[in-house]
Every structure is written in C-alpha cells, then in structure tokens.
Image: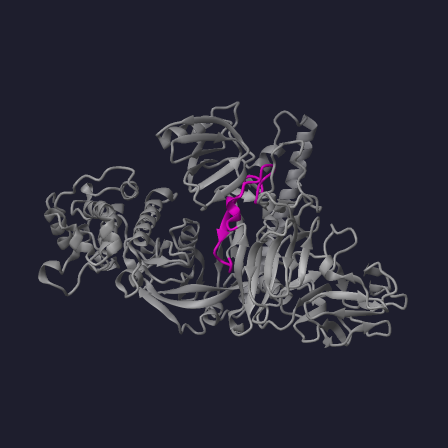
Amino acid sequence: MAFERSIFLFFLLAHLFLTTKVAGQAYTENITRSGPTLSPSGPYSYLTSPSGEFAFGFRSLGSNSSLFLLAIWFNKTSTTQPITWFAKNSSNTAGPVLAPTKSKLELTQTGELVLVGPTTETIWSTDTLDATHLALLEQGNLILYDSTESALWQSFTSPTDTLVPGQSLAKAKALQSKLTDSDFSPGRFKLEASQDGTLALSLVVQPSTKPLDVDSVVADYKPFWEYNNNNSGTSLMFNLSGLLSYKLADASSPYIITQYPTNRYYQHATLDPDGVFRVYVYDKNFSDQGWSCVKELPENACREVVDVGSGMCGFNAYCTQSSNSNPPRLKCMCPQSYSFFDTNRPYLGCRPDFALHNCSADEATDFKIVVMPDADWHSGGDYMHFVTNDQGECQRSCLSDCFCSVAIYSDGGDCWKKKLPLSNGKQGTGEGGKALIKVRVSGGTSLIQQSESVPGSTTKKNRTDLLVAGAVMLSASLLIIIVATAIAYLYLRSKKIHESKQVNLSPIGMNMKIFSYKELHHATRGFVEELGRGSFGIVYKGFLKLEDHPVPVAVKKLDRLLKDGDQEFTNEVQSIGQIHHKNLVKLLGFCNEGSYRMLVYEYMSNGSLTNCVFGTAKLEWNRRAQVAVGVARGLCYLHEGCSSQIIHCDIKPHNILLDDNLVPRISDFGLAKLMGVDQTRAATSNIRGTKGYFAPEWFKNTGITPKMDVYSFGVMLMEIVCCRRNIENVDEEEIVLTYWAYDCFIDGRIDLLVQGDEEAEADIGRVENFLRVAIWCIQENPAMRPTMHKVVLMLEGEVPVAPPPDPSSHM
C-alpha cells in the first residue's frame, strides 16, 4: 500500500511539474553565432522576450526528469504557464522533440539553429543556413534572422496546437491537438483552414496527421464541426489587439470568435486534446483568478456526430462532459460491464467484460438490461427498428435477440436495436432517449477467456502436457504465494503503524478517488469556509488539483456515522459514486481514514435552491418551473433508474443545488442508507429528515418507501411555486403552506399563491397544473401518491392531472 501511494504521488507531482518547472536561468539578449548556448543543465536554459512575458527554452517533461521539451510559453502568469509552441521532429508524426539533460541548443557558425545531444548527434534543427541571430519577440514569436534582418524561419508559421495574438492560421495550415494534457504526441483532432475556405475540425487517423479519408465511403461526409457560411475564408486571424476571427475572401465582415484587449489580458486559443478549440484569457489585474475559458468551438462537442469511425470517443464508449475541470472537458466513458482496452488511451474504445450472447445456444435468461438514461449511440450497429409505446417490449426484444447488444428507446416510442461495435456514443447532452444495454447477469466467461478455450482443438498428448505444465505452474504459484505472505507478515509486524488505516490515494474506477485527511485539510485550508450544515454533517469549500486544473469542491464531514467497518463504508460510497445523472451532484471521492469520514463533491457555484426561492433574488417563474422538473427527473432516476433503488429521505430546497447554468442537482442522495437509516423499518432514532417535509408514515414505524420522497417533493414543489416556506409566521390561515394552498385551490383563488409574480400570474394555467401535482404528492395515504415517473410526466404535460382530493381525506 505504501509503495502504491508513493508511486501515485510521484506521478502526480511529476504531472504538476510539467506546467511549472523551468530549469536553469533566463537569458535576456538575442542568441548569436558567438553564443550563448541553451541547455537544461547549463547556465542558461531559456531565452525571454524583451519584457519577459514569453520564454523559449527547455521545459521539464515531468514524468521523466531527464527529458525536456524545446518550447515557448507564457512566462509571467502566476498560476500555470501554458506552452504556446513546441519543437516537433522532422516527420511531424512521431511527437515532440525530447532533449536529454546534457543536450544543448546553439546557433552554429554556418547559421543553422541546432539541438545537439550528449554525444553530439543532431536531435533537431531548423534546416536553415546563414542565420546571424535568434530572437524571441514580444508577441511570443521565435525568429531566425540573417544579416539583412530578413526572417529565415519563425515559430508562428509552424504552429502546433495554439495561436496567440499576432499569429494567424493560413489556408492549408492546421493546428493539431496533443494526445493528452501530458502527452505531446500528435493527437486525434485537427483544426484546419482548408483549401476550399472552410474552417473545419476533423478527426485524425492515428498515429499520423492525416484527416479521415472518407470520400470513397460516404459522398456527403463533413467534418464534425465547420464554419463556411457559403463564403470562402482565407485565414484564422488572431490580431495584436486581441480580435480572433476568420477572415473571409470577399472582405465582408469576418466571423468573430472572441475579442479581448491585449493590454489587459494574456490570451491563447488552443485545440485541446478532447477536440474542442478553446480561447483562454488571463486578467493581468486579477492574476489570482488564473486562466479562464471564454469560448468553445463547438460549444458542446459531445453532440457532434462523426460520419465515419468511432466518433469523439472510441467504439462502444460514450462521450460526456467532466465537471472536474475548468472548463469542463469532454470525457470518454465505458457503459456498465464494459472496460477500456487501454485506460491510458480511452479513445481506443471499450470492450464487454462478459461473453456475448451465443446464437447457437438459448442464453436469453443469462442476460439483463441496464438502463442508461439520456444516452444514445448515433451511428453504427443499427440493424432493426420498430415503434412501440412499451419500453419493456423494446427490452424484451433485445434480450431474446442474440445479435442485439444495445437497444435505444426514444421518447417517441422508437426502438432501435444495435449490434457491436457502437459509435458516436453520448450521454447527458439532451438525447432524451434511453440506452438499454444488455449485459450478462453473472458467471459469464470473459471474451479473452472465451477466445483461449476452443473445444476440440487439443490432442490427448497436448492435454497431458498441459496438465503437467499446469501442475508445475500451480506448485510454483503456491510457493510464490507462501514466500510473499511470509515477507508481508514480517514487514507489517515490524512496521510501527501510526494510523488506524493506510490511505490509498489511487483512483478508484473511472470517477472516484480516495483522499487522505491531510489532503482534504490542506484543500479546505483547515476546514474554514463553511458552505452549510445538513442532516449528515458540515460542508466546507476547498480546491483540489483534478485533471490538471485547480477545481473548487465541496467537502462534507460526516458526523454520527452509524455504520461500523471501513470496508462497508467504502463499498457503500463507491456504489453512490457510480450513480450519474445531470440532476444529481457528482461524488468525486471520499476519505476513510481513522475516525474521519468525508465525501468530496463537485462544487455548485449558485448554492442551494433555498437562496433562490426564499431569498431576495428569487428565480423567475420559468426558471423555477425548469428547476422543479429537473429535480423530479433526478428523483425518478434514484427511484427507478439505478441498479439498486435509492430513497433520499431528506428532500428539501437546502439539498437541491444549482450549477453554473442553474441546472438543479440533488445532493446527499444515498446518505440515508450510508448513515444507517433502516430502509425496511423507519426507526425514528435514525431519522434525519427535516420538519415540514416528513411524510406522515415517518412516525408510524412502517417501512421506508419511495412515496416518502414523493411527499417531500410535493411540499417543496409548493414552495417553488409560491416562493415561500412551508411554515411561516404569517396570517393564521396561511401559516402552513400545504393547507393554505389546498384551500386556495378549492376556492379557485390560485392567483393568491403567486400574487406579485407577474410572470407566474401570466402563466396561471401551468401554475395550477403544478399545484395539482403537488397536492397529489402530499396525500397522507401513500397509495394515493403518484410515482416520481408519473410526476415527471404530469409536470411536463405528457399526461393530464385530475383534480386532487383533500390530502387527509383517504387515511
């Protein structure tokens, strides 16, 4: 465990080192034939522009401290110092130039800029002669000049993945992404001002720089994003004033992308490894804010469909947005029971962890359907389509069909059956439908195991040899296990243990991490900035380095934990971490060290719904309605969309958080079970719900059911509609909102509930519909309450809402 932790910390520090470490000292004058030379191990390792805003020289590669990039970077930014250019080898396909520690860069007597290795071999050169001096200009352009001050070579005309003010991307030139943030090899995406005048983003065939050649495959193929506007363009221009635009051939108004003044902002436009062209700015007056993304092209790349190939992610994978970075990066994920071929290169796609349905045997009962909401694979694998209003029929059809691996069921009733491989997978981009993924229930043979076991292919002699070899291998394995166990026992016995539990900092799966107490203590600056107190503990704001960016997080310190046993807690938290929905707060990781139990969530910048409904700056009516529907969808997913049903037990505005776009996210889901609330019998000592939101059956020692969440949602829905708390110190008949709201409904005076809210008063029909839904939800008899699935349909107007009875009339 200690070894694994050390290895992880080494790579983490090495990765951070990449964006911060610069070896040696700066040289501030031009480099001439008489010197000096630049070297990672010499007195000068980099050259600066006149004001020092840019630097050129050697940057540590991080993961291998003996290798360095030859690069240009922002030199005065106090946080990260983005690289704007790096030297590539002559073939332009095998990645960046990597310089050993004892290499040196010099301008030779013949006027050639050469990078020489430790044994005097030439690693890289500009292939020019007669240069007299090398200069790094104020704009970050590296230029080789001859004696007449003519430019023989310059970095601006050989761009890598980035443009800076003063630089342009001419026709037939291209930016190519890196493979990953830490791997500078040529990546999978190219931005090109093509010969026909189109500014286009395309996928690149790996490992080369060629776009996908699909002319013979599909006549109407287009890049996954382009700007044309029926007017040929000439170049992508980033002028010195900070205007980034695509210049058009007829001199008409250009396509303006961004415009930020360079006297205030450092800025760069980069084709990131996930295929998105982003513009970043750095406010010189507020340097502590770091770099901010101000533009993305395309705005949601996960929505883009690539006509040929696997799409933005690999075959069988799907594309989603990661909220662990700023800005959110695209992330490739595998469906349940599928794994990446290579976790370091997720774009290679996913393979099933089980044996596929064998058409020669009746195995239908060996499979089940896993529902993946708001997901689709848009191309590849379709072989059958029919229309049905029954999702179950679509599921059964796929289960009984040995060719079917996934079925896509749309809101309109379309059922598309697909076979592997799947391409252009997406989730959480408003797909609307559901992916019904067929997986083996249990005991299935993996594909690798299946391919290695071919009946009838082994002779008697071979079988004997295999048995002998197997016996030898088994004996050797047992001996190794015995020796390893003895060594481990002696090591653990001799080691003085200061903590009750050694913490593993390695990532768990694809989305979860285990953090140490020390790490979270540092991230929260000693747990000083309190975001709020909930039923299960106190929440603090912190910052963690996730996916190469400092990301704000919310750290919840759990109190009065009822579960005993570290493994039970870890298992429970990991199961919560596998739950993903656009209306649920994402769990990033946890701490389970000694007596400390903490959960690390993504940070929601707009706080809780409490502030936006009961505070002075209330959300306008249409936004409140969208929030209500979003919360209902999230609850429906917890009740019906998860592999194991989750009952929240504490739905209230305080536990509904709003992200940057005011999309509602349910927090604290799954904690009722984690904290020991018996979900078969409601022991009041374990109840942590909030007064006013309790369902009546809380107090009757009956089983906890999803209908309890429905009741709490009904109360909260009334609060969202009326912008007031359920219990307030007002006129006697209005003290309890649920009672008053029903009275207003019976009296036909719904307008009193939204008095002064002009937008709601103008939409009184929808207000009444929402009120009817809320009253159905707060029926005291649980059997009278609708399911959350039906609540969603009623709120969206998909099914009519009958006039509700008195909530207390059917007990």
Q: How many marks?
A: 0
Nearer to me, 420 or 148: 148
Residue 615 in percent (x, y) is at 28, 65
Residue 186, percent from left and from top: 68, 51
Q: Could you tell me if residue 208 is visible in this image?
A: yes
Whether residue 303 appears in magenta in the rendering, the answer is yes
Q: Is residue 32 magenta?
A: no
Using the image, determine if residue 41 lies above or below residue 436: below
In the figure, 703 relative to 542: above or below? above
Write the residue at 67% across / 26% down. Answer: 460
Residue in view at x 67 percent, y 31 percent: 216
Task: Please report the residue visible at 58 percent of the width from the left and 33 percent of the height from the top.
Answer: 450
**Residue 483 visible in the current orientation:** no
Q: Nearer the viewer, residue 196 or 34?
A: 196
Q: Residue 115, located in which quarter of the rendered image?
A: bottom right
Position of the N terminus by quadrant? bottom right
The one of 797 and 98 positioned closer to us in this rendering: 797
- Between 80 and 599, the one nearer to me in the picture: 80
Query: Colour scheme used in the picture?
Result: one colour
Image location of residue 64, percent across then percent down:
69, 63
What residue lies at 64% left-to-right and 39% top-to-bottom?
471
* Position of the C terminus by quadrant: top left
Left or right: 595 with respect to 546? left
Magenta-drawn segment: 299-327
